[in-house]
C-alpha cells in the first residue's frame, strides 16, 4: 500500500520532471540554436527590389539589422539516388536561398554539418540541408541538377547544413517535413544574381528588430514592407507565423501544458490516497498513541512522527520520480532530436526542476498526512487508548427512499452501504476513475480526430492527385493542354491571391483561392461534411480564420492583396468551410476572384488527377522535373502517406502513453482502495466466509462496490474528457494545422469499456487476495 | 478437580471408535491430530481425538485454556483441517473436502457462535441475520430468528448500539437463521457477566430443545458444562473422558 503511494507520486513527479525537463531541453536548445543562426523576427518577400534601397531601410527606427537576399522555390531535376525505394522519378523540390559568397555572420545564418562553406573554385557551389542530403545520399562532392531561372543547371555540393528558419521545412501544401521530396539549397549570392537575373537586386528581406519590438515585430515589418511597396511585396511573415518558429512554439507550448496537467492529476490522486492511508494509520495506532500520551510523550512529538513519515514517503516518491523523469526526458528529448535535429538538443539535468518535483511530492505527502492525522492531536490520552468506536452507525441517504431501497435486494443494499459509508475512499475512487476516463477519452478522441482530419481532407476536400504551382500566371487554356498530358485524366486551374485579411484590429495573412466553376478536384465542405457550393460572390472562409478574425457568415472584411494592384477590397463571407490543413486558404469562384483582381483568364496553380498507369506516371513526373514553369509540385498521395506516418503514428503513440497513464491511475487507486478495504474488513469478510459465503460471492460484493464507484466516476469523467480534448485541440492548433475534434459514438463506449477492463483487472488481484485469505488468522484479529 | 472426580460426578462412560452407521451420531472424530509447525518447532495441539457428537443433543467440550478447544471446534465446523485423522459428518468425511465443499458444508449445516460475536458493524441486527439467511434456500424469517432470541425489538439497531449480551443474541439469531443442523459455540459467554451469560445459554438450550439442533458448546467453565447432555473433557491433546451427563441441570440452577 505504501509502495502504491510512493509509485503514484513517483509517476506524478516523473511526468512533471520528464515533460518539463523535455520542455526545458527543447526550449533551451531552440533558443541557443535560434541565437546561433541569428533567426530573424520577420520575413518580407518581394518581386524585386534594388539592394541599395533595402540597405537604406536598415536605419529605420525599430530595425536592428536587415539582410536582403534572393529566395526562390525550384524543382530539382536530379538529386542522387533517393533512399528507401522511393520512385526515382518523383518530382523533388527545393527552397533555394542565397548566402554571401564569402563566409560572414549574417541574419538567418546556417550551421555547417558536413563539408565546407563555399570556396572560390566554382560559382555554382551549393550547400544543402542535412536531412535532404541524407535522404538522397548526397555528400560534399555530389552534383545535383536544379531548374533555376527557367534553365536546368548543375550545382556542386560542398557542404551540408541546418538553419533555424528551415527547422521545419515542409513541401508546398504539406503539413510535415518530407526531406525525400523537399529540401533547402543555399547558393552563392553572385550565382543567384546570375541565374535569376537579379543583379544588384533582391526578392527577400529579413530583419531583426530592436528589443522593444521583440514581442510584436509587426509594426516594424509593416514599415519596412510599406517602404518597399512599390517593388511588389508578396508576403509579410512575422516570426509568430513563420513555420519553423510557429511549429516549435506549438510543440513546446503543448509540452509545457501537458507537463502541468498530467502530473497534477497524478499528484492529486497520490495526495488523496496518502491522506486516506494516514487516517487509517492513525486509527490503527490509536491505542499506541494513547499510551504514549498517557506516559507523557507530548502530542507534538507523536504528531512529528507522522509528519516525518509523510515526509519520507514524499521524498522517496520525489527522488524516484526525479530519476524516472530524467530518464523519461532523455527518451522524449531523443524523439524530438529525430524530429527537429537541433545541434544542442540533449538531456540536461535541471536542478530547479528536481527541486520543484521534490517540493511538490513532499508537499502533497505532508499535506495529506497533516489532514490525515489532524485528529491525533485532538485526542486526549484516555480517548485514544480506547479502541475507536465503530463507524457512525446510521442509515445512508438512499434509504430514505424506502420503496427504491427495498427493491434493491440485499446484496446491493450491502454494497451501497459500504460505498456511502466510506465517503472519502469512494470520493477518491470517483475522482481517480473520472480523471482516468477523461484521459482515456481525450486520448481516443485525439486518435479518431486525427484520422477524421486526414479522411476529411483527402476524401472530401482535396480530390486531386497532384498540384502544380507556377512561377507565373498562365492562360487558362493551359488547363486543356494539361488534360491532354499522358498520365493525366483531369485538370483544373486555380487562381491564388495572397494578401492580408483584416477585420477591425484583427489581421491575418491569407490566400484567396479562385476555383474553376463546378470544381471537382477541390471541394470545400462544412463541419457537417456537407459539400459547400462555391460562391459566385464572396468567399468561403476556413473556420479557424473566421474565429481568429471574429467573422461570421454575412460579415464583410478587408482584403489587401500583396500582388498586383494593392487596392483594398471589401469581401463578403459567404460561408464557413471546415478544414484541418491550410487554415489560411479561403475559397471563391474563379470568376469572382478574377473580377476582384482584374486579371482574367489566368491561373496560378493547376490541380491534376492522374491515371493509375505507372509508366505514364513516370513520364509525367519526368516532365514536371524538367519543366521551367513549375515552381512547386505537391504529390497529394504522398502527403496523405506522410501525414499518416508522421502525425498519426507519432501523435498516436502519445495516445497509448496516455491510456497507459490512465491505466496506472485506475489500477493504482482501485488496488489501493480495495486493499485498504480488504484490510479494514478482514474480520468481516472472514465472518462471511465462516457463514458459508464462497470467495466468489464475497468477491462479487466487493466487485459491485468497485465497479459502481469506478463506472460512475468514469461516466462523470467523460464530460471532463470532452473538455480535455478540446483543450488539447486548441493547444496543438496553429496556422498550418488544426485538429478537427471528432468523437464517434464508439469512443464513449470504448472509454467506459476500458474503464471497465481496468476495473476488472484490478479486481482480479483483489479476488486472488480474497481467495488466499486465511479465515482463521483473520478471525484472530482481535479488535 | 481430577478426572476421576469428574467421572464420578458426571458418570462418564467409554465409547468405541471408528465409522459408525449409527443414525444418532451427527459428527464423529476419529484419531484427529493437529499440529502447528513453526520453523523447526512442531507444536502438537491435538494428539488423537476420538469423539462422537450425538444428533439433537447438547455436547459440551470442557478444557483449560490452551488445551485446543477452539482448534477442535474449528475443525468440526470446517474452517480448519486436521493434520491427521478424519472427521465424519454423517457419512461424509469433511476432513477430505475441498475448500469449496467445506464452504458449502458450512453454509448448509453449520451455525457458528463466537466469543466475540463478529457482527458486521455497518449492518443492523436484522441485516446481520439476513447476511446468513440469504445463503440458504429455506431459511428462517430473519425477524423470526431475532424473535427467537428476544431481539426483535432491536431489529434496526446497529451493533454499536447493543450491549455485549444483546450482540451475542443477535449472533445466535444469525447462526440459527440458516436452520443449521449443527450449532457450534465457542465460549459463547466468555465475554459476558453471569446474568447475561445465562440468558444466552438459555437461548441455546431452548433452541436445542425446540428445534432439535445439535449443539456443541465449548467452555472452560465447569458450571456451564452441567448443561450438556454429554460432556467431553479435553486435556493434553486428547479426550480424557467423554460421557453422558446423568445429572443435567437447567440454566437457572447453574452459577459461576
Ligand atoms: N496458528 C497457530 N499456530 C501455532 N500454534 C497455534 C495456532 N493456533 C493455536 N495454536 C496453539 O494451539 C493451542 C490450542 O489453542 P486453542 O485456541 O485451540 O486453545 P483453546 O483451548 O481454545 O484456549 P482458550 O480457552 O484460551 O480459547 C495453543 O497452545 C495455541 O498456542
Ligand atoms: Mg478458544
Image: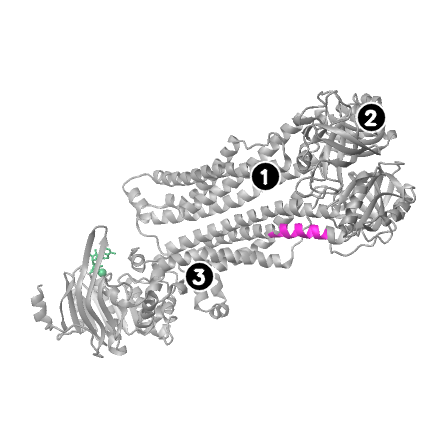
Q: Which residue is mark 2?
A: A193
Query: At which x and y percent is residue A663?
Result: 51, 51
Chain for disc number 2: A
Which one is earlier in the sequence, the residue at label 1 or at label 2?
2
Task: Give the left or right position of residue A230, taking residue B174 as reference.
Answer: right
**Residue A427, above or below A735:** below
In front here: A476 or A579? A476
Which one is earlier in the sequence, the residue at label 3 or at label 2?
2
Query: At which x and y percent is residue A44?
Result: 79, 31
Q: CA distance from mark 3 to mark 1?
A: 50 Å
Q: Which residues are magenta?
A: A444-456
Asked if the residue at tag 1 contacts the one at tag 3, i.e. Cβ–Cβ closer than 8 Å, the answer is no
Which label was assigned to residue A417?
A: 3
Ligand 1's quadrant: bottom left
Task: Give the left or right position of residue A772, taking residue A117 as reference.
Answer: left
User: Outermost residue toward the front?
Assistant: A615
**Comparing labels 3 and 2, the label whose residue is closer to the camera:** 2
Quarter of the figure with residue B183: bottom left
Marks 1/2 same chain: yes
Amino acid at each position: 500500500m505504501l509502495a502504491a503511494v510512493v509509485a503514484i507520486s513517483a509517476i506524478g513527479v516523473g511526468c512533471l520532471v520528464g515533460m518539463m525537463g523535455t520542455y526545458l531541453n527543447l526550449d533551451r536548445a531552440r533558443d541557443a540554436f535560434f541565437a546561433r543562426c541569428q533567426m530573424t523576427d520577420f520575413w518580407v518577400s518581394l518581386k524585386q527590389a534594388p539592394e541599395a534601397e533595402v540597405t537604406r531601410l536598415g536605419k529605420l527606427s525599430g530595425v536592428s539589422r536587415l539582410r536582403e537576399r534572393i529566395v526562390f522555390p525550384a524543382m530539382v531535376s536530379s538529386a542522387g539516388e533517393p533512399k528507401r525505394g522511393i520512385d526515382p522519378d518523383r518530382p523533388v523540390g527545393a527552397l533555394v536561398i542565397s548566402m554571401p559568397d564569402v563566409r560572414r555572420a549574417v541574419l538567418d545564418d546556417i550551421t555547417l554539418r558536413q563539408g565546407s562553406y563555399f570556396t572560390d573554385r566554382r560559382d555554382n557551389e551549393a550547400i544543402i540541408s542535412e536531412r535532404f542530403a541524407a535522404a538522397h545520399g548526397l555528400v560534399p562532392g555530389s552534383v545535383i541538377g536544379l531548374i533555376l531561372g527557367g534553365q536546368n543547371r548543375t550545382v556542386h555540393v560542398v557542404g551540408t547544413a541546418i538553419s533555424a528558419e528551415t527547422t521545419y521545412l515542409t513541401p508546398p501544401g504539406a503539413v510535415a517535413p518530407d526531406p525525400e521530396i523537399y529540401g533547402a539549397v543555399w547558393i552563392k549570392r553572385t550565382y543567384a544574381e546570375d541565374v535569376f537575373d537579379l543583379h544588384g537586386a533582391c526578392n527577400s528581406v529579413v530583419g531583426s528588430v530592436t528589443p522593444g519590438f521583440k514581442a510584436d515585430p509587426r509594426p516594424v515589418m509593416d514599415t519596412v514592407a510599406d517602404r518597399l511597396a512599390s517593388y511588389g511585396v508578396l508576403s509579410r511573415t512575422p516570426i509568430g507565423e513563420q513555420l519553423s518558429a510557429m511549429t516549435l512554439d506549438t510543440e513546446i507550448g503543448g509540452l509545457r501544458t501537458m507537463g502541468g496537467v498530467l502530473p497534477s492529476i497524478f499528484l492529486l490522486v497520490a495526495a488523496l490516497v496518502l491522506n486516506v492511508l494516514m487516517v487509517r494509520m492513525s486509527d490503527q495506532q490509536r491505542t499506541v498513541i494513547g499510551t504514549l500520551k498517557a506516559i507523557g510523550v507530548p502530542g507534538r512529538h507523536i504528531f512529528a512522527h507522522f509528519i516525518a513519515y509523510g515526509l519520507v514517503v514524499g521524498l522517496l516518491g520525489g527522488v524516484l520520480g526525479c530519476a524516472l523523469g530524467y530518464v523519461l526526458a532523455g527518451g522524449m528529448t531523443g524523439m524530438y532530436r529525430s524530429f527537429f535535429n537541433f545541434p544542442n538538443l540533449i538531456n540536461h539535468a535541471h536542478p530547479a526542476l528536481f527541486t520543484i518535483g521534490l517540493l511538490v511530492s513532499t508537499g502533497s505527502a505532508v499535506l495529506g498526512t497533516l489532514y490525515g492525522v489532524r485528529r491525533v492531536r485532538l485526542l486526549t490520552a484516555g480517548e485514544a487508548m480506547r479502541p475507536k468506536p465503530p463507524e457512525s452507525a446510521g442509515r445512508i441517504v438512499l434509504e430514505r427512499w424506502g420503496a427504491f431501497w427495498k427493491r434493491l435486494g440485499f446484496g446491493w443494499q450491502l454494497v451501497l452501504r459500504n460505498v456511502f459509508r466510506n465517503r472519502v475512499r469512494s470520493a477518491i475512487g470517483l475522482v481517480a476513475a473520472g480523471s482516468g476516463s477523461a484521459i482515456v477519452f481525450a486520448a481516443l478522441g485525439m486518435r479518431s480526430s486525427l484520422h477524421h482530419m486526414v479522411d476529411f481532407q483527402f476524401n472530401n476536400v482535396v480530390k486531386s492527385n497532384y498540384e502544380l504551382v507556377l512561377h507565373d500566371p498562365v492562360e487558362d487554356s493551359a488547363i486543356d493542354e494539361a488534360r491532354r498530358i499522358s498520365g493525366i485524366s483531369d485538370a483544373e486551374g486555380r487562381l491564388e491571391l495572397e494578401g492580408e485579411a483584416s477585420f477591425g484590429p484583427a489581421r491575418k495573412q491569407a490566400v484567396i483561392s479562385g476555383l474553376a466553376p463546378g470544381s471537382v478536384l477541390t471541394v470545400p465542405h462544412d463541419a457537417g461534411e456537407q459539400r459547400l457550393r462555391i460562391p459566385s460572390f464572396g468567399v468561403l472562409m476556413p473556420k479557424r480564420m473566421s474565429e481568429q478574425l471574429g467573422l461570421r457568415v454575412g460579415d464583410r472584411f478587408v482584403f489587401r492583396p500583396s500582388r498586383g494592384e494593392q487596392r483594398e477590397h471589401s469581401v463578403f463571407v459567404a460561408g464557413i468551410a471546415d478544414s484541418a490543413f491550410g487554415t489560411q486558404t479561403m475559397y471563391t469562384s474563379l470568376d469572382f476572384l478574377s473580377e476582384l483582381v482584374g486579371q482574367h483568364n489566368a491561373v496560378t496553380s493547376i490541380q491534376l488527377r492522374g491515371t493509375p498507369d505507372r509508366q505514364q506516371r513516370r513520364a509525367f513526373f519526368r516532365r514536371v522535373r524538367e519543366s521551367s514553369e513549375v515552381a512547386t509540385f505537391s504529390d497529394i498521395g504522398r502527403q496523405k502517406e506522410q501525414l499518416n506516418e508522421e502525425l498519426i503514428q507519432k501523435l498516436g503513440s502519445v495516445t497509448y502513453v496516455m491510456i497507459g497513464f490512465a491505466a496506472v491511475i485506475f489500477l493504482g487507486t482501485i488496488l489501493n482502495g480495495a486493499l485498504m478495504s480488504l484490510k479494514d474488513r478482514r474480520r468481516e469478510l472472514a465472518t462471511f466466509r465462516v457463514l458459508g459465503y464462497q470467495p466468489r460471492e464475497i468477491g462479487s460484493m466487493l466487485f459491485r462496490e468497485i465497479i459502481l464507484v469506478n463506472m460512475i466516476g468514469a461516466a462523470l469523467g467523460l464530460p471532463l474528457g470532452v473538455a480535455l480534448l478540446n483543450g488539447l485541440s486548441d493547444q496543438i492548433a496553429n496556422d498550418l494545422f488544426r485538429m478537427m475534434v471528432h468523437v464517434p459514438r464508439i469512443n464513449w463506449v470504448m472509454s467506459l469499456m476500458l474503464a471497465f477492463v481496468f476495473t476488472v483487472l484490478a479486481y482480479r488481484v483483489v479476488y486472488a487476495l480474497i481467495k488466499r485469505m486465511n479465515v482463521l488468522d483473520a478471525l484472530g484479529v482481535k479488535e | 478437580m481430577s478426572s476421576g472426580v469428574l467421572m464420578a460426578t458426571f458418570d462418564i462412560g467409554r465409547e468405541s471408535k471408528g465409522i459408525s452407521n449409527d443414525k444418532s451420531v451427527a459428527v464423529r472424530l476419529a484419531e484427529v491430530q493437529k499440529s502447528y509447525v513453526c520453523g523447526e518447532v512442531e507444536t502438537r495441539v491435538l494428539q488423537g481425538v476420538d469423539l462422537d457428537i450425538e444428533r439433537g443433543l447438547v455436547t459440551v467440550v470442557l478444557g483449560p485454556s490452551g488445551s485446543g478447544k477452539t482448534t477442535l471446534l474449528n475443525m468440526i465446523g470446517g474452517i480448519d483441517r486436521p493434520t491427521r485423522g478424519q472427521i465424519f459428518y454423517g457419512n461424509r468425511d469433511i476432513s477430505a473436502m475441498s475448500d469449496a465443499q467445506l464452504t458449502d458444508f458450512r453454509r448448509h449445516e453449520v451455525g457458528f457462535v463466537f466469543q466475540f460475536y463478529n457482527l458486521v458493524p455497518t449492518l443492523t441486527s436484522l441485516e446481520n441475520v439476513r447476511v446468513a439467511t440469504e445463503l440458504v434456500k429455506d431459511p428462517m424469517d430473519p425477524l423470526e430468528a431475532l424473535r427467537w432470541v428476544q431481539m426483535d425489538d432491536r431489529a434496526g439497531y446497529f451493533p454499536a448500539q447493543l450491549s455485549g449480551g444483546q450482540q451475542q443474541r443477535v449472533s445466535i439469531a444469525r447462526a440459527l437463521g440458516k436452520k443449521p443442523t449443527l450449532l457450534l459455540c465457542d465460549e459463547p459467554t466468555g465475554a459476558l457477566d453471569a446474568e447475561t451469560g445465562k440468558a444466552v445459554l438459555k437461548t441455546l438450550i431452548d433452541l436445542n430443545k425446540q428445534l432439535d439442533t445439535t449443539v456443541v458448546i465449548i467452555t472452560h467453565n465447569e458450571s456451564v458444562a452441567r448443561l450438556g447432555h454429554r460432556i467431553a473433557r479435553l486435556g493434553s491433546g486428547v479426550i480424557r473422558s467423554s460421557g453422558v451427563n446423568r445429572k443435567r441441570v437447567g440454566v437457572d440452577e447453574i452459577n459461576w
